[in-house]
Image: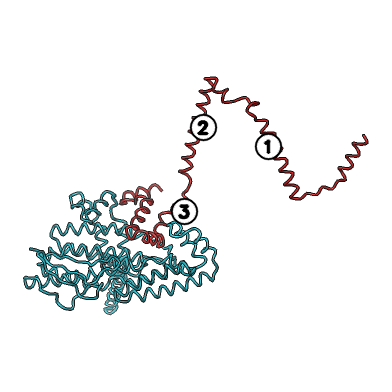
Amino acid sequence: MRLTEDIEKRIKNVKIVIDSESNKRVFSNILQAFRKSTAKDLAPTDQPNIWRMIFRNPLTELAAAAVIIIAVSFFSIHQDQDKQERPRIGKVKQSPAEMMTAMSLKIAYRKGGIEAVEEQYNKAFKQLGPRPGSLSAKQIFAESNGI
Amino acid sequence: MKTMSKNKITRTTCVILMVMASAWPALAYPPDNAAVLYYRASLTYHVNDAMTDKVNDIVKGKAEIDDEIREYVKENRHAIKYFVDAGEASHCDWGLDYSEGMELQMPQFAPLRTLARIVMVRTKISTKSADYNEALDLCLSLHKAGSHIGGDGVLISYLVGLSFNALANQGIMDILPHISDNPEILIRLRGQVFEVSGKLPSLTASLNRDMSVCGQHIDKEKAAYILDELLLGEQISKEKARIIRQADENFFKASKEYYLSHQAALLTAIELPYPESYEQLVRLGEKLGSDSKDNPNAMLTSLIVPAIDRVFCLDVKSKTHFNAIKTAIEVYLIKARTGKLPDALPAGLPGDLFSGKAFKYEKNADGFILSCQGKDLSKDKIYEYEFKVKK
């Protein structure tokens, strides 16, 4: 009892100095010990082979194949969606109004002359959509009466 | 009593006359401002993608006029009328706010380019039905629209205007053989061409305006817009854009000074005769290119100034073509008067602007050829214009 009390007393009074060097040393010792124990734990001779277990039973084999197929298709669908949704870097879409500014048209001209300017206009107007056709007096009256 | 009643009649008449006089300008047609009618024409023409393709093919000579296209042109008769009437207006104010700098919106040119091609097809229809006066009026309306669009605008407006002039020149060339024996129409055309010549847009004015508008963006706050646009257009690296964004006021001040001195050099160069001018413009372009690698102050100028030597050559090409048409009209008039083509060109006719000399004139079995004596140095090409004579 006296020995225990003595140890407790010593521990309480001890001054712990923490520096980065000792930190590193302690951490590398722990890591080394952990690696050794993990390697030992997962030694092939000691572990049951899960793949062997699956393929021994035709039912589990079928189920595993189904899970793999579902996982692969799920992953590929999501990847495609990502590709579609992700904006292209450096090619952010311009609004039709932005496409018809003096600067934007000038850049188009620099790239491909007056044909490129026209192409830019076509793209902008395509985005703007069709213009309203002729407006008859009948339509105006109908709309006014509806208000 | 008599005087009083007479006074009343006089007063009433005066009031009516005053009201009529004040209301008259509001009712006048066409309006003074051509842009009103161009905008109106843009709103009125019938948009049809399939027909637009067909119109383009006909203008390029890849397709023939058929009933379907005649019907489409007929549907657009009101838009064509506004377009032609706009040419008669004394001035054209598009209502653009140039203080917006390069953010200035210019959507008005796209529908007008489509409409110009429809007008061109209508010209071909009129030529087919031997209505040459109408066909020529339509061509000249394209020239007038070119001047209205290109005059006082920025460089892009100027280039669009130039494309209208090129279309009009081609249209007149196609009609000329049909009227080669008709002095009446030729004299009328000569007068119209003379009128249009005086209104052709000036590259110097346009370049000056463009550079002032662009120059607004050589500024710490306003540079962001053009940098974003240049990045989008893949005209600048991200690294370069980042450096410019982080630059201080002194950088922009020095960049502006470089820009203004480059602008002054360009404006001086385009006033020289063609070969010297072209050489000088190319040299300035090369200097700008090399400066932008070593001198940070040249970086922004190199990013916003297009290849002016190319624009200059297009301008000279279009005006030379128009001069060839003017010369050809005189040759045709001699033929109409004397019954045969002259052996040489009369003196004092407008010449080839590439060489600054008169056109080379050569008769052949179908008519005559006017050739330039100087090359288009940007394409290393000598232009020839062939004019046929009605047999």
| Left or right placement of residue B117 versus residue A60 in this view | left
Output the chain of dot 3: A
- Against B310, residue B114 (above or below) is above
Q: Are marks 2 and 1 on the same chain?
A: yes
Percent position of residue B298, x then y: 46, 69
In this view of the protein, which residue sits in the foreground, B269 or B25?
Answer: B269
User: Label 3 is placed on what type of residue?
Assistant: Gly
Nearest the eye: B326 or B13: B326
Residue A35, numbered label: 1
**Left/right of residue A124 with respect to residue B323 in the rendered view:** right
Image mark 2: chain: A
**Chain coloured cyan in this rendering:** B
Where residue B128 sits: x, y (%)?
14, 57
- Position of residue B349 relative to residue B222, above or below, is below
Which residue in the structure is indicated by mark 3? A90
Residue A140, compared with residue B130, is above or below; it is above
Q: CA distance from mark 1 to mark 3?
A: 45 Å
Would you say the residues marked 2 and 3 are in contact, meaning their CB atoms lie under 8 Å apart? no
For mark 2, give the secondary structure.
Answer: helix
Q: Which residue in the structure is indicated by mark 2?
A: A71
Q: Position of residue B282 (x, y in %)?
A: 35, 70
Q: CA distance from mark 2 to mark 3?
A: 33 Å
Q: What sort of colour scheme is used for the picture?
A: by chain
Which residue is outermost to the right?
A2
The answer to whether residue B94 is left or right of residue B57 is right
Mark 2 or mark 1, earlier in chain: 1
Of the chain colours in the picture, the one used for chain A is red
